[in-house]
Image: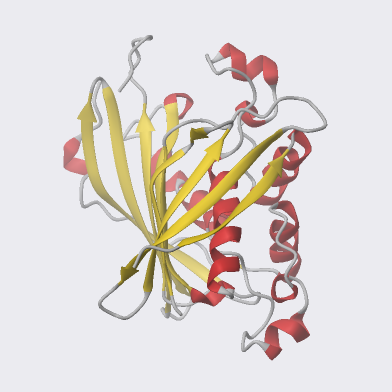
Amino acid sequence: MTDLLEPQTFRVTRADLVRYAGASGDFNPIHWSERFATGVGLPGVIAHGMFTMALVGRAVTTWAGAADAVVEFSVRFSRPVPVPDTDEGTEVVVSATVKGTTDEGHVRLALTATCQGEKVLSLAQAVIRK
Amino acid sequence: MPLDQSFVGRTYPPTEPYLVGREKIREFARAIGATDAEYHDPEAARARGYADVVAPPTFPVIVTMGSSKQFIEDPELGMDYTRVVHGDQKFAYTRPVVAGDTLVCHNTIEEITSRGGHDFLTTRTDVTTESGEPVLTAWSKLVQRGEERGETK
């Protein structure tokens, strides 16, 4: 069984990063200061890895149908998500394929997140209760 | 200097209880664009079987990241947080977090490895209620980049 689930697209702007910083308590300046981000060798302000994971989590809960249907959820942050200081910002596209069932009868999803055509996560997967 | 391997297996004392507020869940849900009623409306959440508004799956990072000060600021381990980036994150849920939960973190250093001049620190955080009921476990791999510039993994 290999089913491709409907991909979901999330727009990410600088305002989203500021809001996420406040809500999560992660005020690392690489997520809001261009000067600081470029000073440490980044291409510019980048999204919090955990913000990207949160967006993937939204996609997973949508596919699963409920917040309590998520049993396991894991990602590796393999590439930063640069967020330009424009009204449009950037986009993260999340897709998933069903990779069979676990011994407990749960559904295993292999997850992909891309930004500007590049994969930003690796080894991303979720186990959901169906 | 690489991180000291002898810290593998070290556990830290349980953290001070974190009371999960309804408004904090709503604020977090708004910040990630999660608009479903179960994150915002207690009535809707109860109708779906939750005790109160339910937290999105990555919400617990607020609590676990707060607790990570225990090892990040452990002078004996001696991490340099200015060189740290987030490598991996995993959650395994016993049940979802809901408003009104009082959460306690139990941190363990699971693995320390070094490769290409970088250090990799994997921690496990068992999150329970104040009375010891398991809620979830979070694993986090932090990468402390080498002090030499221009190195890649």
Residue B32 position, x and y percent, is 68, 53
Q: How is the image coloured?
A: secondary structure
> Which residue appears farthest toward the left when viewing the image?
B6
Where is residue A67? Give x, y as percent: 57, 72
- Residue A84 is left or right of residue B79, and the answer is right
Q: Is residue B137 above or below residue B131?
A: above
Residue at 73% x, 55% y is B33
Residue at image point 28% right, 30% down: B119
Nearest the viewer among B73 and A13 is: A13
Query: Which of the pair A73/B62 is nearer the observer?
Result: A73
Q: Is residue B86 left or right of residue A43?
A: left
How many marks can you see?
Answer: 0
* Residue situated furthest right in the rendering: A87
Q: Nearer the viewer, residue B97 or B100?
A: B97
Left or right: where A47 falls relative to A87 = left
On screen, B87 above or below A35? Answer: below
Q: Is residue B59 visible?
A: no
What residue is at 83 percent from the left and 31 percent from the top?
A87
Can residue B77 be seen here? The reply is: yes
Quadrant of the image occupied by residue B48: bottom right
Q: Position of residue B35 (x, y in %)?
A: 75, 64
- For the N terminus of chain A, the quadrant is bottom left
Front in this rendered view, residue B125 or A65: A65
* Vertical relation: A117 (above or below) A100: above
Image quadrant where residue B5 sits: top left
The relative height of residue B123 versus residue A77 in the rendered view (above or below) is: below
* Coordinates of residue B90 in the picture (x, y in percent): 40, 55
